[in-house]
Amino acid sequence: MGVADRLPDGWRDWLQWNEACDQDSGTPGVEAEMLRTDAGRALGFTRVIARRND
């Protein structure tokens, strides 16, 4: 048995991670711009929880 759902505002966490990586590398990435443009309409984080039956 398992469950999957979309994390509320998960795209913001993804964006924050991308911006930190871009700042660290010194090069702007297209992924952060893509996330800002989408603003959570289609992109985000999904949480999946499963249980193994023994």
Image (cartoon, helix red, strand yellow):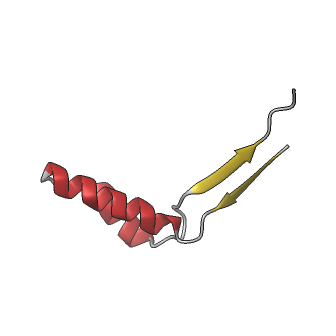
- The correct choice, above or below, for 41 with respect to 30 in the image is below
Q: Is 2 in front, or is 27?
A: 2
Left or right, 50 with reference to 19 = right
Residue occupying the point 26% across, 58% down: 20
View extreme (left): residue? 26
Front position in the image: 54 or 46: 54
Q: Nearer the viewer, residue 36 or 1?
A: 1
Number of on-image labels: 0
Q: Position of residue 3 (x, y in %)?
A: 77, 52
Residue 30 in percent (x, y) is at 28, 56
Residue situated in front as seen by the camera: 9 or 54: 54
Residue ID at (47%, 65%): 11
Looking at the picture, does residue 39 appear above or below residue 25?
below
Looking at the rendering, in which quadrant would you find the C terminus? top right
Does the rendering let one see residue 13? yes
* Viewer can see residue 28: no
Q: Looking at the image, is 2 positioned above or below residue 23? A: above
Specify the quadrant of the image occupied by residue 33: bottom left
Q: Identify the residue shown where x is 32% and y is 57%.
A: 18
From the image, which quarter does the N terminus lie in? top right
Residue 2: x and y, percent? 80, 46
Report the side of 51 relative to 39 (left or right): right
Q: Position of residue 26 (x, y in %)?
A: 12, 53
Image-quadrant location for residue 28: bottom left
Q: Residue at x 72, y 47 (%)?
A: 49
